[in-house]
Amino acid sequence: MRTYVRMIVCVYLPRFELAVATGEHSQVGRQTLAGRPLAVAPLPGAEQRVGEVSGAAEARGVARGMVLGEALARCPDLMLVPGDPVRVVEAWEAAMRALEAIGAALEPARPGLAYFEADGLRAVHGALKGTIAAARRALDRPVRIGAAPTRFCALAGALAARSSRPLVLEGKEAQRWLVGRPVELLGYRRDTATLIEPLTRLGVRTLGELQRLGRAALTDRFGAPGALAHALACGEDSPLRPRRMEECLEESMAVGDASSGEALRRVLGVLVSRLLARAERRGRTLRAATLSARLLAGGGWRERVVFRQALADPERIWLALSVRLLALPAPAAELALAVERFGPPASDQGVLFEQAGADPVRSPCFGAGPARTEARPRRRGPAPSAHAARLSEAIAQVRAVAGQDAALRAVCVDPDSRVPERRVVLAPIPE
């Protein structure tokens, strides 16, 4: 009987944000293909660092995240393109939905980079080659694809692959191939991105050199990121965590002359009322929302807002969102509001402490007559089922703010160990 090895497919759209900002069929987009040094300009009011850069700018020493002054000093003829985070999110969402239409359960890393497991698609598309071909047809744009047993190996393969030919690495071959890859690959992981600079100063150039340093030495020097970097260099990685499918509920409006100030806040109030009145909401509360705008001067602005608790009150939602309008970098031409994550139905939102009934308390009366009876509420906490429901709601809200790893539980595995780190481990709380 033939056995199949689990394969992770990495889909990488090179310089996705720059391609969206320039436009694929515009004159500036053609200049990108012609080899002009381009970079995404920082948004007004944000930190002055350039975004994604073209290949010509990268050859001149300009890198993503570099300070604008240093980038212009290295490349005086660098052409800055206004960034458009709104169009980037829309284009990336369309690309992810196209991949999910072929049956892929995606784990997005950032715009232009995503992973999915190919084993579950064998019955639909046949072998791995058929799955990769289906993903390429779904995107219908230049894409680099790598496949390997782990997420990090697949990423390394996608970065080294050509647009017309995927790179497939299997078994021990993937680990041997990973040894010669540059240490800059760690920059694609948020937990290990900060290690590139100190490792470069120490003379570590490849993942093989990093692997030979040993996990104990890296953990002692860099802590948990060092241990993770060594595990990645050895070909180890955590399982995929596909994104949760959420309904897309959005309202937008051209603001006209109400491009700023109090008039813009009134437009926001109209969007909130329209969004809550949609039948697709089905009485559910809003846990997180996205406020975006297209600017009159070009480009866009986008702000993610997570409420302190799931809300369905239009006034409270408007108050939480109107404060974010102060961060608008320029007058807006269009304002949009979208639901990013729903909460439970509004009927399930109870008070923090319920008063379950009242105990009659007899108090003495001054003078003649019978004793007076007063109704005093019982001081009870919530019922066990209500307490569990509220705890689950609190965990869901924390995860909406800080991610899936924000709420963990401590599990005792070796209480008699002399090493404190081995006594207790952190595990995710099931939803």
Image (spheres, grey):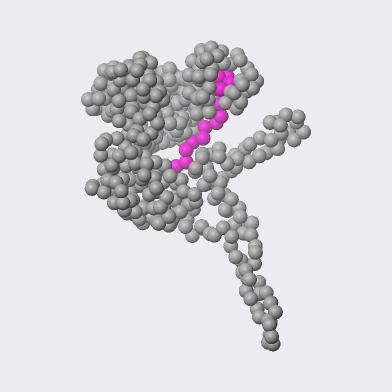
Q: Quadrant of residue 79?
A: top left
Residue 426: quarter of image: top right
Quarter-of-image position of residue 108: top left
Q: Residue reaching furthest bottom?
A: 368
Instruction: Report if residue 268 is visible in the image.
Output: yes
In the image, is residue 317 above or below residue 192?
below
| In the foreground, 230 or 139 | 230
| Image position of 222 (left or right of 294) | right
Helix, strand or loop for the magenta stretch, by majority = loop
423 within the magenta span = no
* Residue 275 left/right relative to 423: left
Magenta extent: 229-247
Image x and y of residue 349, in percent: 51, 57
Of 180 and 59, nearer the camera is 59
Q: Residue at x 49, y 36 (%)?
A: 242
Image point (31%, 53%), residue name: 266
> Does the magenta portion include 246?
yes
Residue at (61, 15) in percent of width and height? 213
Look at the image and tell me in which quarter the C terminus lies: top right
Q: Is residue 46 left or right of residue 25?
A: right
Image x and y of residue 150, in percent: 53, 25
207 relative to 341, above or below: above
- Count every numbered label the image shows and give the total: 0
Q: Position of residue 49 (x, y in %)?
A: 39, 27
Residue at 33 percent across and 27 percent down: it is 40
- Residue 278 at least partly seen: no
Where residue 201 appears, as percent x and y from the top left, is 52, 15
Residue occupying the far right of the picture: 416
